[in-house]
Every structure is written in structure tokens, then in C-alpha cells.
Amino acid sequence: MYTPKDFKITDESVALRVIEEHSFATLFSQHDGKPVATHLPLLLNKENTYLYGHFARPNPQWKEIEQQTVLVVFHGPHCYISPSWYESDQTVPTWNYVSVHVYGEVELIKDENELVDSLDELVSTFEAPGSSYSLGDLDPALLTGMSRGVQGFKIKINQIEGKAKLSQNHSTERQERVIHQLEQKPTTDEQQIASWMKGNLK
């Protein structure tokens, strides 16, 4: 990922937070000699050493993926930045965004208990607190059938790159103007980028 020095996320805990808050990722690998991608949720283990996920078994991407070095992209918030927000409009528009790239090697999960544990962790993470739904309450035959329909995997994390392009190449005055404009927007991405920019100015 092209990352000028001012935009680099140097604190790994910040990059890990992006992964946890924006866990629906894009996984890139090679299949039949071509780049392929799948969009899917991925979860960090407690030690932050592996990402866990699963493919639908009919998806051919998993069939050649073991031992490949893959790229996973976690897309954080992003939004358009208008030159009309600056003190002068003699400049160009841009896009502010936060993104994290993870590189690692894939191991297919062959142990059914490990697969079920990873699926249970996924459900527990995204179900609302107090939800009545739990994989543990499913009929065992249904759970077994569901498990056979997916191919679990884990990615051993080798490298994490983070980028937060937040108008750091502009003056503090311009950054404050951008924050003010973004805070007037009702949409989530603009609000999140404003929050990131405010944190960056501290």
C-alpha cells in the first residue's frame, strides 16, 4: 500500500482497532493463475496473531489458497473532501480514508471442533447483547450440516500496514474547516472521518 510518512498508522493498536471495528474485509489470493477476491467477515484471535474466517464451500478460492501469502484489506471510513471548504478554492478535491492491509499465510481448518468454535465466536461477536440466538442451541444435525457447507481457515498474520489519510498535508486551519463541514453531514462515514481527524489534531 502506498503510504506517505504523514499518513502511516504507526501504532499497531490503532490498526488492530480498525480491523475489529471494520471486520467485513476483502481477501485477495491467486486461483488458476489469476487474482481473486472474496468479501467476508474476519475475526482476530485474542493474541492478535491469526485472523479466522470461512468460505462457502462451493467458492473455489479456498482450493488453492493453503500456504499462499494473501492480502486482506479492511476498509475503514472514507469520504469526499471538497475544496470549497477551504479558505481558498484554488486547490483540488481529495478523498480521506482509513484502511488496513494484512499479509499472511492461510491454513485450512480441518478440525470440526475448531471450525465450530470459530463460527460460534463469529456469531457471538455480531449478535446483539442479550440476543436469544446461539449456535449452541441448534440441533446438532443442523449444525453439522452447516459446518459441512463451509471451509474454515485461519491466516497467520505476518505483516500489518495501516493508512489514515486525514488531510495531514494541509494546515491546521484547513483541517479544522474540513472537520466542521464533515460534522454537519448526517452520514456515518463523514462523522467517523471527522472524529479521526479531531483525534489526529490532539
Image (tube, rainbow, N blue to C red):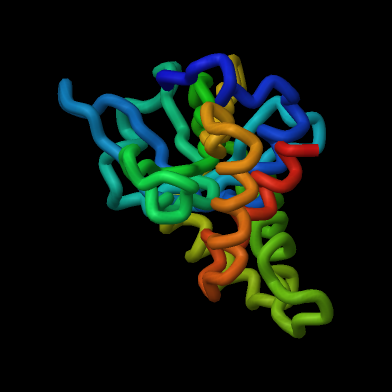
In terms of depth relative to the viewer, which is nearer, 159 or 1? 1
Is 175 located above or below residue 48 in the figure? below
Residue 119 visible in the shown view: no
In terms of depth relative to the viewer, which is nearer, 40 or 166? 166
- In which quadrant of the rendered image does the N terminus lie? top left
- The residue lying at 66 percent from left, 52 percent from top is 21
- Side of 135 relative to 76 (left or right): right
- The residue lying at 54 percent from left, 45 percent from top is 53
Q: Position of residue 155 (x, y in %)?
A: 56, 29
Q: Position of residue 136 (x, y in %)?
A: 74, 69
In terms of depth relative to the viewer, which is nearer, 144 or 108? 108
In terms of depth relative to the viewer, which is nearer, 64 or 165? 165
- The residue lying at 33 percent from left, 28 percent from top is 29
Q: Position of residue 98 (x, y in %)?
A: 54, 40
- In which quadrant of the rendered image does the C terminus lie? top right
- Side of 61 relative to 178 (left or right): left
Q: Quadrant of residue 164?
A: top right
- The residue lying at 32 percent from left, 33 percent from top is 63
| Residue furthest bottom in the image | 132
Q: Position of residue 87 (x, y in %)?
A: 48, 47
Is 56 located above or below residue 27 in the figure? below
| Residue furthest left in the image | 33
Task: Tell how many labels.
Answer: 0
Residue 98 visible in the shown view: yes
Is 161 located above or below residue 86 in the figure? above
- Side of 158 relative to 75 (left or right): right
Is 6 located above or below residue 146 in the figure? above
